[in-house]
Every structure is written in C-alpha cells, then in structure tokens.
Image: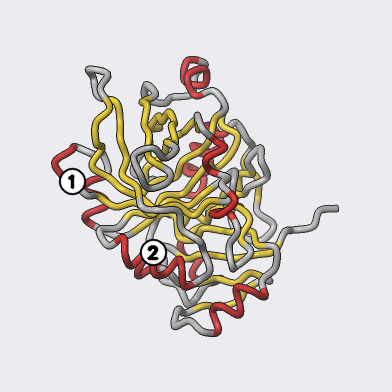
Amino acid sequence: MIHGIDHVSFGSPDLAAMEATCAEIGFVLTPYCEHQTTNADGAVVPAGSAQRSIAFGDTYLELQTIVDANRGHPLTDRIMGSTQVHLLVFGAADLVASVEGGLPGAPPLAWERPVLPGPDGPVARFLYSSLPGDENFPYLLGVVQQMTPELMALPEYISHPNSARRVSGITVVTDDMQAVAATLSAYMGRPVETSPSLGLQVRTAIDQVVWIVDRRAFKAVHPQLSAGLGIAVVSIEVAELAPVEKLLSRSQLSHHKTCGRLVVDARQSLGASIEFHEQIQKG
C-alpha cells in the first residue's frame, strides 16, 4: 500500500521561472527531459509534458510544463492555465497489488523519461495510477511505483547547496479539514491526529507529515502569505538552516521565520511556499 509522499509536482507554463527560483534558493536541478507513455497499442509515444526534478534520493520535487498541448496530457489545461502545485503523488512498493487489493486507483499506466541527455542515457520508468478526489481537492492525487529508484539517487543531483535532504511534508489549506483528513487517511491507511501546532495531521509510514489546516487558521500563523485552497506549503528537511539563510540573504524572495522554520514565499513562480526545517529530534 501507500508508504508516503513520493513527490510533489509544481506545474506552470513558465518552466524557466520555476527553474530560476529553485536555483536561487539552493536546489540542484536534474537535466530537462520530456515524458513518454505507452499508448493503447503498446507503443511508447511522447506524452506532451516535460520536467526538471529536484531529487533527494527517496523523494523529489517535480517542475512540470506542457510542451505539446495536442498530446492529450491529462494536466494540460491545469498547467497551462495557472502556476500551482497541481499534483500530490504518493509512493507504493507494488502499485498493481495495491490497486487490486482495494486502493481506489485507476489501472496503472507505464510512463518513462530520460534521466540524462543523449539517446543512450538511462531511462527512469514508473507505474502511475490516479486517485479520485472531490470538490475539496483543487489539486490531483496519484500513486506511483518507481521501477528504477536508483536513478533518483544519482550523486551529482542529490547534493544541494541549501543542504536539503528530503520532502518531509506538505500543508493543505481547506475549508473542510475533516473531509480532507478523512480522504487522505483512508488512502494512506494512517490515522488522523490533532496537530500539536495547528489543525489536523496525517503522518505517513516514512515519517512525513500532511498538515490539514483551516484557511483562517493558516492566515493567522502566516500573515505574510495569502493562501487559497490547496497545497500552500511544501516542507523540506535540511541538514542545517544556515546555508538557506545565507542564500536568502542574497535573494529578492520574501521569507520569514516561524517556529524555527524558514518559509520562502515562492507563490509567484511555483504556486506555493517552500518551508525549510532541520531534522526534528525525537524523544
């Protein structure tokens, strides 16, 4: 079944703006690549989308855009229409077994993309299944099984100047916390908890946290940010905050510190804010 957040996908018609912001705050980006998928006849064909990634080894951020609107990519209208987090993707060790076992996902589809430039470079392969949402989810939900996970941990792409280590969570802003929490809890097979800081939370099996927060409460905690409904903040665990602070001292991006976390307002280019924090010590 689902073990946690595999990746968060930012979508925009302006890939260059996303790239620039991520580089400015200290992320290394993988090379540009275009997606391919398998059609009904079993042929591998262009999917009409392209991406660059920010890889951490076991999780990543995706910067996605549309390069051919005639290919029928399911996110074409959303990505070309606005800049935001369009897709939250969970990970599963065996996606086919998960769907057959009751996870309400669509039949898994095979996708692939080159990892490095050149015709003979390695190709990342994965299975993807969409999950049903409702009016409480202005973003899409999906589950992926990485068939070539070693390609997400290439040494030259997982060492970041900001010392980032992994995607550690997201903050979902909603007008119906109970409904959103119930849906995410059911998909992940994890209980809903009362957050010690704000709203509700669902903790994944790999110790990430999905915070579900009322819109008014979010505004009270982050008065600098005007959040609509959806994924407002993506949390990134770093080895230490000092490199991020140094990078931001030379940046024009608005940022603030709250509860020991450094929040960067990247809504204009990414559609959400990025929150950096050091590892939380347990016990």
Q: Nearer the viewer, residue 248 or 210?
A: 248
Quarter-wise, where is residue 17 in the image? Answer: bottom left
Q: Earlier in the sequence, mark 2 or mark 1?
A: 2
Quarter-wise, where is residue 202 in the image? Answer: top right
Q: Nearer the viewer, residue 248 or 196?
A: 248
Q: Which residue is mark 2?
A: 19
Q: Residue at x 32, y 40 (%)?
A: 35
Mark 1 nearby-residue class (10 Å; few <14, some 14–19, many ≥20):
some
Residue 9, percent from left and from top? 41, 50
Q: Nearer the viewer, residue 17 or 104?
A: 17
**Secondary structure beneath label 2:** helix
**C-alpha gap between disc 2 and disc 1:** 19 Å
Residue type at mark 2?
Answer: Glu
Q: Which residue is mark 1?
A: 68
Q: Residue at x 47, y 33 (%)?
A: 144
Residue 122, percent from left and from top? 44, 37
The residue furthest right is: 283
Residue 274 visible in image: yes
Instruction: Report whether 67 appears left or right of 255.
Output: left
Work out whether 196 lies above or below 260. above
Work out whether 140 lies above or below 257. above
Quarter of the picture holding the N terminus: top right
Are the two marked residues, 2 and 1, in contact with CB atoms closer than 8 angstroms?
no
Q: Residue at x 56, y 47 (%)?
A: 154
Work out whether 111 lies above or below 40. below
Residue 217 visible in image: no
The residue furthest top is: 100
Residue 36, percent from left and from top? 30, 35
Q: Residue at x 60, y 65 (%)?
A: 276
Q: Nearer the viewer, residue 215 or 172?
A: 172
**Secondary structure beneath label 1:** loop
Instruction: Report whether 238 appears left or right of 82.
Output: right
